[in-house]
Image: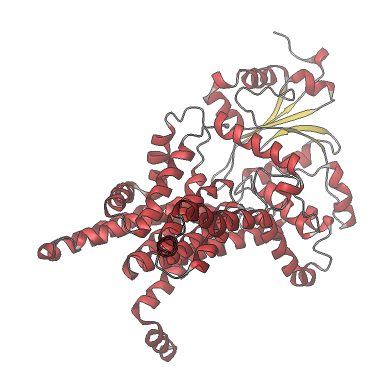
Amino acid sequence: MRAAATRLWSRLGLPGVLLLAVLALALVLRLDGIAWGLPYSFVNADESTVVPKAFAVARGHLDPQFFYYPSLYFYLLGGLYVVATPLMWLLRHGNPLAMGAYVVDPGPYFLLGRLLSAAFGTISVYLVFRLGRVAYGRPAGLLAALFLAVTPLHVAYSHMAVTDVTATALSLLALLLLLKATQGRGRRWLVAGAVAAGLATSTKYNLGLLVLPASVAAVYACRGEVTRRAAAGARAALLWPRLLATRVYAPMLAAFLLASPFVVLDARQFAHDFLRQNRIMHRGWLGFENTGNGFWYNLHVNLGGTLGVVLLILVVLGVAWALWRHTPLDLLLAPYVLVYFAYVSTWTELADRYLLPVVPLLILLAVRCSLEVAVLRPSAKRVVVPMVGVLLAVAVVAPLTDSLRFDRGLSGVDVRERAKQWVEQNLPAGSTIAAENYGPPLVRTADEKYYLAAGHATPAYHLVRLKLPQPGVPDERRDIGWLRARHVGYVIVSSRVYGRVFAAARSYPESVAFYRRLAREGVLLTTLSPRSGERGPVLKVYRLVPRSRAPQG
């Protein structure tokens, strides 16, 4: 063992060993608790949207018929399911791509999606190291990788089978390739960077803003060629649009369309979903009604919450420092970061995950600023360098502590599992139940055949989904009369919905009236709250009695 360690040290050197240690830390933080809650998607409700689409792709349905997200992540995860099919077949003793296999036990499919995110999360840490090393030197790359490895927002979403961390990794790859293009590596690097940017955009639409750093990189990469051709008689004013179009915009668009082809082939559905998603972003979403100014909220709540106060201050200084120094990478990163931050801050839905693509870049700029300031005055290095070292050490404590706390929280059971058992023991099978998001994972009558075929007799119910309320958007289902007309016998509501509604009662008068009428006319059968060691919302189960027997007044 000692001899192997010695050989590794001699081959990699101290920087290589430190990088391996950072990557190992990143991987451990992202794998710890990754199977929590399975076979249910309690860790993030969006998993229940993403994973079924990827499973459909694995079964040959390439048109997702869903464009709130682009399609690349569905294809990547669907491809992983296909690759894993032989192993899953051996372990499950049946066809893992059969619909019944997924319906009866979706746990392995969620787990593979989470492992894919954990892998891309760790790759992101490596890519930010490479980006920092190429631009600012190995120490900056190592420190930036360390900070990203322990950043709680990145750690948390690396546990989830959703698109965000994969998109972040692809955006970092694009920026690394574009940086190499600015260093005179040739137009192939520029085109490769544009292709990577297109793939990132095909994972998250908002990464289309990578067109900005790609254009900056093109200026650096092509200015020598434009100068030579202009000296030979060509018109520079015509050369620039042509070069940008052929080496940046066309490759980026082509990569996006190849990775999400049905935005064209199913253009009507794409237009419907894309426009509706944009309306949601600007109109707002449940829980973001009282956020105030989006710029300030993103800065002090979303960024401050994931970076900590010390690192956030360094980030602000780092962006200002980059604008002042304006090296090629500074001009690649700083305008992009500012435009991206401004763009998402104009939205009314201010989810923290929308900032994930720029978090590694902000960290890199903060680290770079700290290291350059430390050696700015050689006469004061003996004092300033230790001070900066202590400052960076303090800055890493808050995100690392939060990441460890997140991982520790992925333990025990969720109250929704207990609620599922309560419903199955107390409500008649076949009942019609209206349930909100964040409720118990009940079996639908439409899926009962799969359980029976697998030899699992389980109570099944006619489920009526109560969609999340949206400000200014009426929902006929959140009406007691509508539910009674459809013979709904029971209603299950969750504090993660009604708690947010009552916190912004002015925005949801109809939903408030629904809850109050439900409490007045329904019979509260049970309230299920998380016990010690449990996670999850408070759930209330009502029996909805016929109108003639409902309490009046």
Residue 128: image x %, image y %? 43, 63
Residue depicted at x 65% and y 32%: 468
Residue depicted at x 39% and y 77%: 17
Q: Quadrant of residue 527?
A: top right
Q: Quadrant of the N terminus?
A: bottom left
Front in this rendered view, residue 336 or 292: 336
From this viewpoint, which residue is outermost toward the top?
553
Badge count:
0
Q: Is residue 285 above or below residue 144?
A: above
Residue 509: image x %, image y %? 61, 18
Q: Quadrant of residue 496?
A: top right
Indicate how the structure is coloured in the image: secondary structure
Front in this rendered view, residue 124 or 235: 235
Residue 447: image x %, image y %? 84, 47
- The answer to whether residue 202 is visible is yes
Q: Is residue 438 above or below residue 75?
A: above
Instruction: Say left or right for 180 vs 200.
Output: left
Residue depicted at x 37% and y 39%: 300
Q: Quadrant of the C terminus?
A: top right
